Image: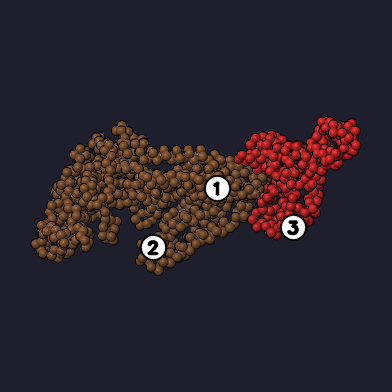
């Protein structure tokens, strides 16, 4: 289990991570979602012991990580800008990591290289960005560590490879103690793989929830009422995340259980009311909008 | 879980990864050692007479000796240390690499020392191989000597220590910075910091403190590699004897300092490495707290250097104005430049106004301290209660300079250390219980006389006034040996025309400790084995053979008469000649160069010495036959067409001239107190079979003794 408690980290005047508290349970796939500059990479770098937090603590299996090689041995970190030795081949990298990670499975690595169609003896500097990402994931998987931290790792993968990697993750989860932590802003990628997500925004955690629970607890309703008074009264009665009015149509994003929400809406006798499914991306946008991150201003 | 023996695996891994470094080291030392040595051996073999040493001696004492510090070898070692440090630890300047290594299950200590050691192994392995190959080549060419192997071992140890020192300093620079360019600049600064500071101190003290004088060996700062290498080079020179054989044992007395110095720098680098935040890569300086300190340390000396540079370009009268301009200019420009480098952004140049002001105030204070002598450097004279003894050197009064071959500061019997009369006196003289010495020091410090250099036209009233004022000025150096072990030196200007000064000077000159401490022969010469005394009168020279008995008697006689000699004698009496004691090595040197320093003046008052030397075979009063002289040329100053030369071949005139002149050779080293004895604008040379003229053919006219015919003829020529 990874426990980050009130960690903060600043780079000069910039607060990259502010008072973040996150708990990552063993055996779950944890997705770390955040806008650009939200502090995802910084959080992962702190969590795997590269950076020392200015305040707060990070513990893996109840022991600190920073400058603790035995704990670091349980973690493999895949950076968004992964370093490969100059002129190295995949096999050179395997030998490199094998010296650090005693559990590195070289045979499996070779097999997986073949499976993914990566040339064992090919120079990595001739590989495409996607191939390098694949290689990083394979090295991380074959290091056989309990925790795998992936920073934007899925971004360069094509859909087929993405599915293949997801499959490997699923396999690892069933066969051994394995806890991947995946940071990304590609919300659709995380939606169908993560068990739990934490949303970071401007250095702080907005929320951390089980994905299903998160989906069950936030909904968008479209409804039309006969009078403006009913519109206003409904907004008062609900835990509104966001509300828009398009003509007479109210589009409201609301926290709460679907049934309870509909019960409240129906109490105001709507002319029309329905619940729309909310994707993770929409949840993310809604949550960030609440704290002043107006996605539309960026898009339009 | 981490693998076992990770430390050694990391070394192996790093060696494999940086194999090019070993290859580069191999190629570099192949060229610097084998190729260079083979070329030189070829030259020595083909033209042996042109070299003072044999091929075997060359290999033993130069290739595997002195070259290790004084030539290209040490440069190669330093370059390899620099490359090794930057390519071994340069990963800290790149985020991707830093993240990779620091996320690995390995402690920073293990990572640091494995890389450190790997760099050493990668340097040492090819280097040792090349040294062994050199020994093999020497053996193959018949140049093998028993000393080669031990010298090779010493050589490897010496180069390894130099490598470790420079390597550790460069690693510390890498750890201190987050950017490769700034890292290299920092490494450069750290490499030569102490030498630059020592030079700056020297320049500032010489510029602003007129009483400042130093003897470099005791004053040199050496906490950075360049300064330490300079000291090591000095020690190497001292460690070579007359035959060029290097004594590594002596070199080791200083070389052993390299090991703790390298250890200190390595530990400093390690601490910096441990404390260095991973996010520091990309920044100019890895530690925020170090930035203002570094700025101050760089900016203030650089501004002072700039001031001195501009000041030196200007004339003496305008020096201070231009010094101030240079200091302010350097301070502002470099201050802004440093801010720009540290911020890596031209917009950041005004980022730290408070630091800028603080440094400016510090600079202003320093300039004030130097310019106004706020700390009283020039007027400082220790209290009698603080003093153990003092040494006095009156410039150009009985100066006897020679190669000190015994009891040198390195306690080396055959050292080639050259010391001036002044330096010798500062080392050897221990005046105690003579109040005149300190009274003169206090008087000189209080008066604060200084030479004034003037640009006025010769003959102008101002020129004449200054000339009159300064014509009897003389430099005097005091060395204070303090009770706490410190040695403090001061140089003053005294006026010999001042009766009070003269009285004090007379008393110092009469002091037994002054007399003995002022001369190598009278002080330590007793234990030296001289085989010859080279005697010179104005017109004759001759060698007198010495046996131990003769040497002791001559020294004793000369010393007893020299001790009785007063300053008044020196200032009013023409010496009859000089005498130089020669060891076996001196005789060889004399036969090679025709000259050996260290001539002791013989005054007419030294009747017993003169008699003894006459008994041994040299008569100071033996004249010269006029018939042997074909011409005397008199140089009577400068006219419109250059030097006015008057030629005299008439035997009567020659006889008159011989009666009026004294050889310049026997008056060297005694100029200050004999100004009144000689004409300073007219001198002459002798053409003919005069033995004394061969070694130095210039003669001074005794005061007011220029013959009338010379005066008339020269006056006529001036009129024309």
User: Relative to A252, is B563 on the left or the right?
Assistant: left
Secondary structure under tag 1 reads: helix
Q: Reading the chain from its start, which is encountered first: label 2 or label 1?
A: 2
**Which color scheme is applied?**
by chain
Tag 2 and tag 1, C-beta contact below 8 Å? no
The chain letter under disc 3 is A
Secondary structure under tag 3 reads: loop
Disc 2/disc 1 C-alpha distance (Å): 60 Å
Residue annotated with mark 3: A118
Q: Position of residue A254 (x, y in %)?
A: 82, 36
Camera-nearest residue between B214 and A157 = A157
Tell me the quarter of the picture where residue B480 sits: top left
User: Which residue is at the far bottom?
Assistant: B46
Camera-nearest residue between B136 and A258 = A258
Q: Position of residue B3 (x, y in %)?
A: 68, 46
Tag 3 and tag 2, C-beta contact below 8 Å? no
Disc 3/disc 2 C-alpha distance (Å): 64 Å
The answer to whether dots 2 and 1 both sit on one chain is yes
Residue annotated with mark 1: B346
Tag 1 and tag 3, C-beta contact below 8 Å? no
Q: Position of residue A277 (x, y in %)?
A: 85, 42
Question: Can residue B224 be seen?
Answer: no
Mark 1 neighbour class, 10 Å CA radius: few under 14, some 14 to 19, many 20 or more: few
Q: Please give the letter of the chain rendered in brown.
A: B
Residue annotated with mark 2: B54
- The residue shown at (88%, 35%) is A225
The chain letter under disc 1 is B
């Amino acid at each position: 289990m990874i426990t980050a408690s009130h960690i903060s980290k600043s780079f000069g005047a910039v607060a990259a991570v502010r008072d973040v508290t996150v708990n990552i349970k063993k055996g779950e796939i944890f997705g770390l979602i955040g806008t650009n500059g939200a502090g995802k990479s910084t959080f992962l770098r702190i969590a795997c012991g590269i950076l020392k937090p200015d305040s707060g603590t990070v513990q893996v299996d109840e022991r600190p990580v920073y400058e603790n090689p035995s704990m670091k041995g349980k973690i493999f970190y895949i950076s968004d800008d992964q370093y490969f030795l100059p002129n190295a081949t995949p096999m050179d990298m395997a030998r490199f990591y094998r010296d650090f990670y005693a559990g590195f499975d070289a045979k499996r690595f070779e097999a997986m290289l073949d499976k993914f169609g990566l040339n064992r003896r090919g120079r990595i500097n001739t590989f495409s960005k996607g191939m390098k990402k694949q290689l990083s994931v394979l090295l991380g998987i074959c290091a056989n560590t309990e925790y795998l931290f992936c920073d934007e790792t899925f971004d360069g993968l094509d859909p087929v490879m993405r599915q293949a990697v997801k499959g490997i993750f699923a396999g690892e989860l069933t066969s051994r103690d394995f806890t991947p932590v995946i940071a990304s802003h590609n919300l659709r990628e995380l939606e169908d793989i993560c068990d739990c997500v934490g949303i970071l925004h401007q250095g702080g955690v907005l929320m951390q929830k089980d994905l299903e629970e998160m989906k069950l607890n936030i909904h968008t309703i479209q409804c039309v009422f006969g009078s403006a008074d009913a519109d206003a009264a409904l907004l008062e009665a609900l835990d509104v995340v966001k509300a828009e009015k398009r003509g007479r149509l109210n589009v409201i994003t609301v926290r709460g259980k679907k049934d309870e929400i509909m019960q409240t809406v129906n109490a105001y006798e709507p002319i029309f009311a329905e619940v729309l499914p909310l994707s993770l991306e929409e949840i993310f946008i809604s949550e960030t909008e609440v704290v002043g991150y107006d996605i539309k201003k960026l898009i339009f | 879980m981490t693998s076992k023996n990770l430390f050694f695996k990391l070394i192996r891994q790093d060696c494999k990864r940086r194999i090019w470094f070993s290859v580069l080291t191999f190629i570099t030392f192949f060229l610097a050692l084998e190729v260079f040595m083979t070329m030189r051996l070829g030259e020595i073999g083909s033209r042996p007479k042109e070299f003072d040493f044999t091929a075997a001696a060359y290999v033993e004492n130069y290739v595997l000796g002195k070259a290790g510090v004084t030539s290209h070898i040490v440069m190669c070692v330093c370059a390899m240390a620099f490359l090794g440090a930057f390519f071994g630890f340069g990963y800290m300047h790149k985020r991707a690499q830093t993240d990779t290594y620091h996320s690995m299950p390995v402690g920073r200590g293990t990572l640091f020392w494995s890389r450190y050691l790997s760099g050493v192994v990668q340097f040492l392995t090819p280097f040792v191989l090349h040294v062994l190959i050199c020994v093999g080549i020497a053996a193959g060419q018949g140049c093998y000597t028993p000393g080669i192997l031990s010298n090779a071992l010493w050589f490897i140890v010496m180069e390894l220590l130099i490598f470790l020192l420079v390597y550790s300093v460069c690693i510390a620079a890498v750890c201190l910075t987050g950017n490769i360019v700034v890292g290299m600049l920092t490494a450069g600064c750290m490499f030569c910091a102490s030498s630059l500071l020592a030079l700056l101190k020297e320049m500032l003290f010489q510029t602003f403190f007129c009483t400042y004088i130093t003897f470099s060996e005791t004053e040199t700062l050496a906490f950075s590699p360049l300064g330490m290498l300079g000291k090591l080079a000095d020690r190497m020179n001292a460690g070579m004897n007359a035959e060029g054989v290097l004594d590594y044992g002596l070199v080791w007395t200083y070389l052993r300092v390299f090991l703790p110095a390298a250890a200190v720098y390595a530990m400093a680098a390690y601490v910096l490495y441990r404390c260095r935040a991973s996010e520091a890569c990309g920044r100019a300086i890895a530690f925020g707290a170090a930035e203002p300190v570094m700025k101050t340390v760089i900016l203030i000396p650089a501004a002072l250097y700039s001031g001195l540079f501009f000041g030196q370009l200007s004339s003496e009268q305008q020096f201070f104005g231009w010094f101030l301009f240079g200091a302010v200019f350097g301070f502002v420009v470099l201050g802004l430049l440093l801010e720009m480098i540290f911020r890596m952004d031209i917009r950041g140049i005004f980022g730290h106004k408070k630091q800028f002001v603080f440094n400016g105030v510090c600079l202003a204070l320093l300039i004030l301290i130097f310019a106004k002598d706020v700390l009283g450097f020039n007027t400082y004279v220790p209290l009698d209660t603080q003093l153990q003894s003092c040494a006095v050197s009156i410039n150009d009064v009985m100066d006897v300079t020679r190669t000190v071959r015994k009891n040198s500061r390195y306690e080396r019997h055959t050292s080639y250390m050259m010391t001036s009369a002044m330096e010798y006196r500062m080392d050897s003289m221990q005046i105690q219980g003579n109040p005149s010495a300190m009274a003169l020091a206090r008087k000189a410090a209080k008066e604060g006389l200084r030479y004034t250099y003037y640009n006025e036209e010769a003959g102008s009233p101002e020129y004449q006034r200054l000339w009159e004022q300064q014509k009897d000025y003389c430099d005097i150096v005091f060395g204070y040996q303090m009770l706490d072990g410190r040695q403090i030196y001061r140089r003053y200007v005294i006026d010999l025309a001042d009766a009070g000064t003269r009285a004090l000077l007379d008393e110092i000159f009469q002091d037994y400790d002054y007399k003995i401490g002022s001369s190598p022969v009278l002080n330590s010469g007793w234990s030296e084995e001289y085989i010859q005394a080279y005697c010179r009168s104005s017109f004759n020279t001759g060698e007198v053979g010495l046996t131990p008995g003769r040497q002791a008697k001559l020294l004793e006689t000369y010393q007893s008469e020299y001790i009785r000699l007063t300053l008044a004698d020196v200032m009013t009496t023409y010496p009859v000649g000089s005498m130089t004691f020669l060891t076996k090595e001196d005789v060889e040197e004399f036969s090679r160069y025709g000259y050996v320093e260290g001539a002791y003046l013989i005054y007419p008052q030294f009747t017993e010495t003169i008699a003894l030397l006459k008994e041994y075979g040299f008569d100071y009063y033996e004249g010269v036959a006029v018939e042997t002289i074909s011409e005397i040329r008199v140089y009577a100053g400068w006219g419109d067409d250059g030097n006015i030369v008057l030629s005299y071949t008439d035997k009567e005139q020659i006889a008159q001239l011989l009666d009026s002149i004294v050889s310049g050779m026997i008056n060297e080293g005694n100029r200050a107190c004999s100004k009144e004895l000689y004409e300073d604008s007219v001198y002459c040379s002798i053409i003919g079979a005069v033995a004394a003229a061969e070694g130095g053919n210039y003669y001074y006219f005794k005061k007011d003794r220029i013959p009338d015919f010379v005066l008339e003829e020269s006056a006529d020529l001036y009129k024309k």
